[in-house]
Image: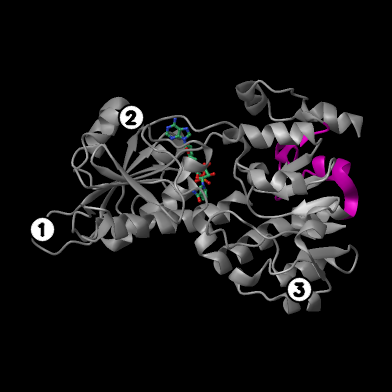
Amino acid sequence: MLGLVKESMDFEFRVGLVPHDVAQITPYFKVLVEEGAGLMSGYHDEDYKQAGAQIVKREEAWAQSVVAKCKEPLEHEYSLLAEGTTLFSYLDLAYNKSLAQMFIDKKITSLCTETLAGPKNNYPVLAPMSVVAGQLAAHLVQHYLLALEHLPGVFGLGVLLGGLSGQARVKVVVVGGVVGLEAAKFLSQAGARVVVLEIDPLKLQNHPYKELYHLEILAVHEANIEYALSGAVGLVGAVLITATSTPKVILKRHLSLMQKGGVVVDVACDLGGCVETIHQTSHSQPVYLQEGLIHYGVPNMPGVVAKTSSIAYSQASLPYLRHFLEHGLKSFLSANTKEVANTLGALSAYQGYLTQEGIARAFNLPFMDPCAVLKSL
Ligand SMILES: NC(=O)c1ccc[n+]([C@@H]2O[C@H](COP(=O)([O-])OP(=O)(O)OC[C@H]3O[C@@H](n4cnc5c(N)ncnc54)[C@H](O)[C@@H]3O)[C@@H](O)[C@H]2O)c1
């Protein structure tokens, strides 16, 4: 049976499946939903009942053989997972050794939705949340530039991204892929001068938004980082190397070139962040001051746009969850469809082993090749 559990991270109001998508599963699979799981996304227990699910207490939802959720379990929830459970969720495992250890200890099969790879080197279940986070990042840059007291005694610079005619445009720097594109688009639409630091040679040659949004696209190297950050009031970082912790691309010395009082939003903080000075924060206390810059490092940004994000996550992940429930792990892991080139990439732990090599090596934990897992099924 499938348990759909309620999130408990700080201001994490998303739910792993919305009632409309639960209704696609219940005709052939029993779904037990934790009471109140969808409330903050605007879905009542009654909506899930009408979708054919049963509403149960927290412990019962977590005790099912397959547990679906949106964000990784927190330490106080580990004891709720039974040995041998299959967990289907975003996991950010590369930055969470205690979670990896728990997967090993409890022989969890973990299907990590953000590392399901699409045919064009894309991540179809991660992408919608990256779009949400990119849009939010642009809003946050503007918000923390307002001359409000963001921290005791710390006020924003008091500048508007759009500026006014007769004044120099303010500069914001963006590094990253899906998040980066979305942030660049929104920042540019707001009127900022946007410089994008890009490592992908294809995008350097032919960036999809370059002309449309008047972006300045620069290759990532020391001189360009320095040029881009000189005088910038904002930085959005969103670098990703799948299934590893994030490389530090923007260093302390680069930040010293930004305008004091400027804003750093490191969206990649969920996997360690690409800015040297970032550490994770929470929606309750989202920012801190370092190097004279307001730093924002919330790892679950979409949690506060719960309705939009829950619908998007549920819709993007449903086909894979359904495939797993209907056909089992072997079929799921060998599915190479038009939409998904590598479901094997989603397997992050199995039977007491980690199955993503970079993570196993970084944490010094036992590794099993996912192809060997597939062969053994
Ligand atoms: N904080 C949140 O709430 C939140 C929400 C969504 C996504 N994220 C995170 O944001 C990050 C980015 O996600 P995405 O979907 O945009 O990923 P993506 O794969 O679309 O983009 C990552 C980009 O990083 C670039 N890159 C890799 N190495 C680089 C380097 N050394 N220098 C410069 N660029 C480099 C790649 O070329 C790619 O364009 C991920 O860590 C993801 O988990 C966080």
User: What SS does tag 1 mark?
Assistant: loop
User: What SS does tag 2 mark?
Assistant: loop
Q: Which residue is mark 2?
A: 251
> Percent x, y for residue 377?
91, 35
Amino acid type at circle 2 is Leu
Amino acid type at circle 1 is Gln
Q: Is residue 248 found left or right of 106 in the rendered image?
A: left
Q: Is residue 60 found left or right of 246 in the rendered image?
A: right
Q: Upstream in the sequence, badge 1 or badge 2?
A: 1
Tell me the distance, in whole angstroms, between the alpha carbons under discs 1 and 3.
54 Å
Which of the two discs, 2 and 3, sits closer to the camera? 3
Q: Residue furthest left?
A: 166
Q: Is residue 66 above or below residue 229?
A: below
Q: Is residue 348 above or below residue 62?
A: above
Labels 2 & 3 near each other (Cβ < 8 A): no
Residue 236 is a magenta residue? no
Q: Is residue 149 visible?
A: yes
> Percent x, y for residue 59?
79, 57
Labels 1 & 2 near each other (Cβ < 8 A): no
Amino acid type at circle 3 is Tyr
Q: Residue 167's mark?
A: 1
For the record, the magenta segment spans 326-351
